[in-house]
Amino acid sequence: MQGDHATQVRTLGESRAVVLGGTSGVGLATALRLARAGSPEIVINGRDAKRGTAAVAAIESAGGTAYFVEGDAGDPADVARVVAEAHDRLGRIDVAVSAVAPRGEVSLLEKIAADEMLRILDALTRPPLLLTREVVPFMKSAGGGSIISVASDAAKVTTPGEAVVGAGMAAIAMFSRTAAMEVKRHGIRVNVLTPSLISGTRTSDAILEHDLGSKIFEKVAAKAQLGVPTADEVAGLIEFLAGPAAAKITGQVISINGGISAG
């Protein structure tokens, strides 16, 4: 059985992919890398049709064939529809990436209203959980696949102002690790990447606009003596995890943070 699964890990040149949050940041960088690696068709998702059109053009300029499917990555019905349409267009789904930018505001716990705390937690966890739930049946029928979610090192490292964000990211990590153990018998791998800061993204820029976020993350960035990773560098690790070189890697929560922390 294990040998059968190993033979079903397709090269990136054979892999068809769906990327939630694929119109900007890490999601778009991932789609571009997959296109350059020869992935024949890629479905990207987002809520902004104009940005989606521009992303499709960029992916096709990189040598890929791309389709944009509009939808809210936090809405169960939308994610089910996006994944079903991706499967209809692609014929199968070999790689699924949740790269929806986490929108967890940096704020001390005592200053977050209870209903806002629950809203943030819900918004952070929905996209990767929903995507995984929807793609597993399609990957089972195809004989395997790779699911990769982008979370945050807040899942593992305590940072003042990120109590709620950390809770959400830890939930994504444990969900993915447990899902990996459930689906490994079907040749499906599930992994999580946990960057701290990602330079040049809209999410990082938004955090740095706030006084508390700016103070905290300036201190954090100073610890990244290997450099704060870019979206393309994070996407490079996603590309690796999506391909056959990572065929034996599953259930892992991998930091990419330039040396900010180890763990």
Image (tube, grey):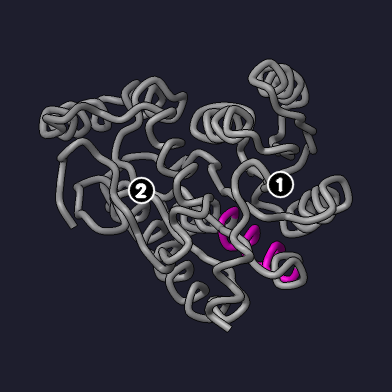
Question: Which region is colored magenta?
Answer: 127-137
Q: In the picture, residue 155 is in which quadrant?
A: bottom left
Image location of residue 254, percent across then percent down: 32, 54
Q: Which residue is mark 2?
A: 152
Q: In the picture, residue 222 is in which quadrant?
A: top left
Return the disc, 2 or 1, that comes first in the chain's sequence: 1
How many neighbours does mark 2 have within 10 angstroms: few (below 14), some (14-19), or many (20 or more)?
many
Please name the residue shown 42% across and 56% down the image. 192
User: Is residue 128 inside the magenta stretch?
Assistant: yes
Image location of residue 114, percent across then percent down: 43, 58
153 shown above or below 8: above
The N terminus, quarter of image: bottom right
Q: Which mark is residue 126?
A: none
Please name the residue shown 55% across and 42% down the image. 100
Q: In the picture, residue 188 is in which quadrant?
A: bottom right
- Relative to the observer, which residue lies in front, 224 or 183? 183
- Relative to the observer, which residue lies in front, 183 or 128? 183
* Amino acid marked by disc 1: Arg
Is residue 116 toward the left or the right of residue 130 in the image?
Answer: left
At mark 2, the secondary structure is loop
193 shown above or below 144: above
User: Is residue 69 inside the magenta stretch?
Assistant: no
Q: Which residue is mark 1?
A: 16
Q: Which numbered mark, 2 or 1, is in the foreground of this view?
A: 1
Residues at marks 2 and 1, CA–CA distance in whole angstroms: 26 Å
The C terminus, quarter of image: bottom left
At mark 1, the secondary structure is loop
